[in-house]
Amino acid sequence: MSDRPYILWLDDPAASKNPILGGKFSSLAESTAAGLAVPPGFGITTHAYRDFMEAAGLVEEAARVRKACADLDPEHIAKETVALIHGILNAPLPEALETAVRTAYDALETRTAANVPVAVRSSGESEDLAGASFAGQYETYLWITGADALLQHMRKCWAGMYGDAVLSYKHDGESVISKGDFGICVGIQQMVQARAAGVMFTLDPITGDRSKIAIESCWGLGEGVVKGDITPSQFTVDKVTLKLLKSKISHQTEEYRFDTESGGVDLFPVNDGRQDSPCLSQADAVALAILAKRIEKDRGAPQDIEWAIGANGDIAVLQVRPETVWSSKEAKPVLKVTSPINHVLMRMSGGGAKG
């Protein structure tokens, strides 16, 4: 067990950039090591997934499914995966694995609170291969409480490896999952009771301008921004001066939040006169920009960051990953011609169009 751990905590020195935590969670471990405010948690490692699949006798069936589904349409994939998914959801767990997960959840309760609500997130080895867009095909479950429920949703994350969206996903025209026997980590983190949340990019995602930080936010949990079913408010901050350059406030009628009756997360009306109010103050936007600038400096490239602000105003980092659209392109200075004299000078220096 020492060289094949089933549990690895985000604040363990061995966690940062460790592949057994998958792409998403190893990145969060790196953020934790850098001193960022990442909610506490642990990863149920890829070793756990692989040992379960071996013990359940599902390794060969998983290989068959990956091969069979490589070129199938999503509507035909479900027929191929019925037996595999049933096995993942119902086969007995190895005793050592179940004990390790229950013990880790107990330890998280000791660190935080009894019956602590957690986010259960899939974190796959294949995310780095296919880029940030592929990570969005995996499953996330919010506000899960209790070890029994955690184990059930761990299985759902494993089964999600063989869902229609994942198996049909292609990168550069090729099936991602069919390229290898990729493992998956299940990340467990304390939930943040967010008053506002969203995403931010350390460049302008429309133009690629690296002198700007673009923030999208909404009231409540950030699922609305991530899923795209809530129109976010938008803020643009100058990366050098940290001045708020522009804000566009969205009319928001619904927000994601925890429902005590159902025990889950759902959409609810935005009340208390907040529908047309900014979910971020100017100070909030600048504080987020300062954080984004720090993360980009640490990572050495433009970043895509998920964040949440709690009721007390503290910012939590929920996810950090490379920006994939513009960051691979060469950064070029933006030249502005402000007068005929400047235009002439540019031509003389070779900066203008040839004539």
Image (cartoon, rainbow, N blue to C red):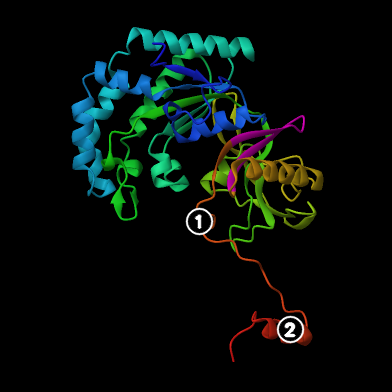
Q: Position of residue 310 (x, y in %)?
A: 71, 31
Are the residues tagged 2 and 1 within 8 Å (C-beta)? no
Residue at the bottom extreme? 355
Residue at the spot 47% in from the left edge and 28% down from the top edge? 18
183 vs 272, nearest the viewer = 183
SS type, badge 2: helix
The boundaries of the magenta stretch are: 303-318
Residue at the spot 76% in from the left edge and 33% down from the top edge? 313
- Can residue 114 be seen in the rendering of this structure? no
- Can residue 328 be seen in the rendering of this structure? yes
- Left or right: residue 57 versus residue 111 is left
Above-or-below relation of 316 to 108: below
27 vs 313, nearest the viewer = 27
Residue at the spot 35% in from the left edge and 44% down from the top edge? 165
Q: Position of residue 136 (x, y in %)?
A: 45, 42
Looking at the rendered structure, the kind of residue marked 2 is Leu
Q: Is-magenta flag for residue 317?
A: yes
Position of the C terminus, as image quadrant, is bottom right
Q: Main secondary structure of the magenta part?
A: strand
Instruction: Place residue 109 in its image quadrant.
Output: top right
Above-or-below relation of 355 to 102: below
Instruction: Place residue 77 in its image quadrant.
Output: top left
Residue holding disc 2: 345
SS type, badge 1: loop
Position of the N terminus, as image quadrant, is top left
Mark in the foreground, 2 or 1: 2
Which label number is shown at residue 328? 1
